[in-house]
Amino acid sequence: MIEVERLTKRYGATLAVDDLSFTVAPGTVTGFLGPNGAGKSTTMRAILGLVHPSAGTTAVLGMPYRELERPLQRVGALLETFDAHPGRSGRSHLRVLAVAGGIPRSRVEEVLALVDMAGAGRRRVKGYSLGMRQRLGLAAALLGDPEVLVLDEPANGLDPQGIRWLRDFLRSLASDGRAILISSHVLAEVAQTVDDVVIIHRGKLVRHVAMGDVEDMAAGATTVRSPDAARLASLLAELSLGVREIGDGRLSVAAPPERIGALAAANGVVLHELSVERATLEEVFLELTGEPGERGA
Amino acid sequence: MTRLFAAEILKLRTLRSTWGFAFVAMLLATLVTAGNIGGTPARDRLDPDLQFRIVLDAAFPASILALLVGMILVTNEFRHGTIARTLLAVPRRARFVGIKLLTGAAAGAMLMLITLTVIAATSVIWLGLLDVPLALDRAGDGAGRAVTGVVIAGILGAAVGGAVHSQVGALVGALVWIFVAEPVCWVILGLLNLDGVSEYLPAASLGGIMDSGGGGLPFAGSVGVALAWAALAAVLALVRTGRRDIT
């Protein structure tokens, strides 16, 4: 369980996080979304006790992170900035963390194998690619087999297979009852992984909804094409449904396709096309965050 | 606390720079020991105080190295961004600073162990070839002072690193202080007829612990003053590290 309660963080005159509250329940994967600079990383660092809140509180498993005993065994974290010494090998980096966290050394080999890094464990970190660094960070987060995971942009640098692996892995962890918070600035990247989304913009909460609700928001008007478009338009207008001509005998109608199809059939109007105008998840995201975006682009 | 300290020692052991410092300490100890024995007239070699001086003079460079290692073991965390991962394991900042001070002390002690081994090997062989009997009591006295000095240097280094955070700032600042600023202070204090005050400055007090000449503060006084400077730096480290946001 992660709790953020009226969190505010100021850096001088800059307000990074503004009165933000949300919770992440056990057994769920929550996407933490917002454009770059929205305050996601600051919030995650506040949750992990790395940043001092200007106001408000954060708690993990019912207490501030700093009060956790053996925190590496309770909470796994992946931060956006790489946090291994470049002169140390990946295996050595994990061994240091294992010793610090009171975690058996054998677990190092397990997590290296888990993130497909067993062969690269002996290499110095400074020679790692971005994807390898990300995998090492994930290995560090998973080292203590924690109950809570806080992952800042975990898909960064991963190839498509890696992203698919991460998605399936996070789902399996959540099904074990773990609470997982993952940040991203790309909604589509986490759409298949998360149960809930917390969307923030300029440090403020925009929406905390179930992922299914976001998908519903993506469903828009219906496009209908008919050789008798003018008659269909008048029939629809009689029912006070919003109708807009969009050319080539097409109409954009503010109604579900089932209703339009039934109306056309009842009045003998031939239809050549009946389709839902579905916004992409990114368009919904941009709309929610108020960022400029071209619908349908 | 034990596992966190063990992790810090593992960090030190698995970095090449640590072994580089150890190599430099061994090299300097060999050179200074050889220079001290070779540069001493034959008639003076039987003076038991020679062996006291050999140990302290050869061990002194190790105290400077221990100071630098102490600084690096903290500032490396900020330089390479590993501080975030370290604080995830040790979220209480005061405990983090405490462990770093302890590690600084241990690093200094390990550096001195290596140094003393080299000094002993070089001295025993060379003095044996010259038929000079070993004065173990005086050499042991020197070794005790050397270990004390280098342990405090390691603690002071870690504390300064925790207070400054910038690796370049800490290292350059410390070297400039030791070799430029404090000697200038000594001159100024001398001109003001306040020579005695200069013995209380950080580098002078640290040097006083390992001083083979007998001038300045007594051994215990030098230890006390050096510890006071280390304590002051440790308080600054606690305040600075405790307040810092890791972004």
Image (spheres, rainbow, N blue to C red):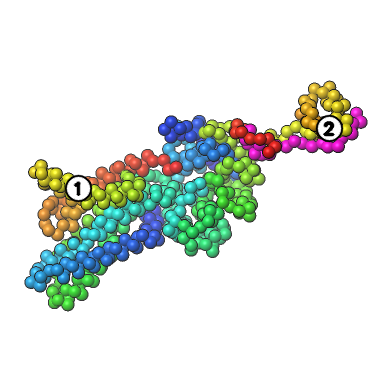
Whether residue A148 is visible: no
Front one among B35 and A206: B35
- Residue A103 image offset from top left, x and y in percent: 47, 56
- The quadrant of the image that shows the N terminus of chain A is top right
Q: Which residue is mark 2?
A: A249
Q: Indicate the amino acid at tag 1.
A: Glu
Q: Which residues are magenta?
A: A267-287
Residue found at x 24% / y 48%: B177
Q: Can the viewer see residue B216 in this picture?
A: yes
Identified at 50% across, 41% down, the residue is A41
Residue furthest right as drawn: A268
| Depth check, front residue: A254 or A54 | A254
The kind of secondary structure element at disc 2 is loop
Looking at the image, residue B138 sits to the left or right of residue A161; the answer is: left
* Percent coordinates x, y for residue B55 in the rendering: 19, 64
Q: Which mark is residue B182?
A: 1
Crowdedness near tag 2: few (<14), some (14–19) or many (≥20) residues, C-alpha within 10 Å: some
Q: Which mark is residue B133?
A: none
- The quarter of the image holding the C terminus of chain A is top right
Residue at 30% from the left image edge and 54% from the top image edge: B68
How far apart are labels 1 and 2 at the CA level?
89 Å
Asked if the magenta segment contains residue A278, the reply would be yes
* Residue nearer the viewer, A63 or B98: B98
Which residue is depicted at the point 10% across and 70% down?
A: B41
Badge 1 sits on which subunit?
B
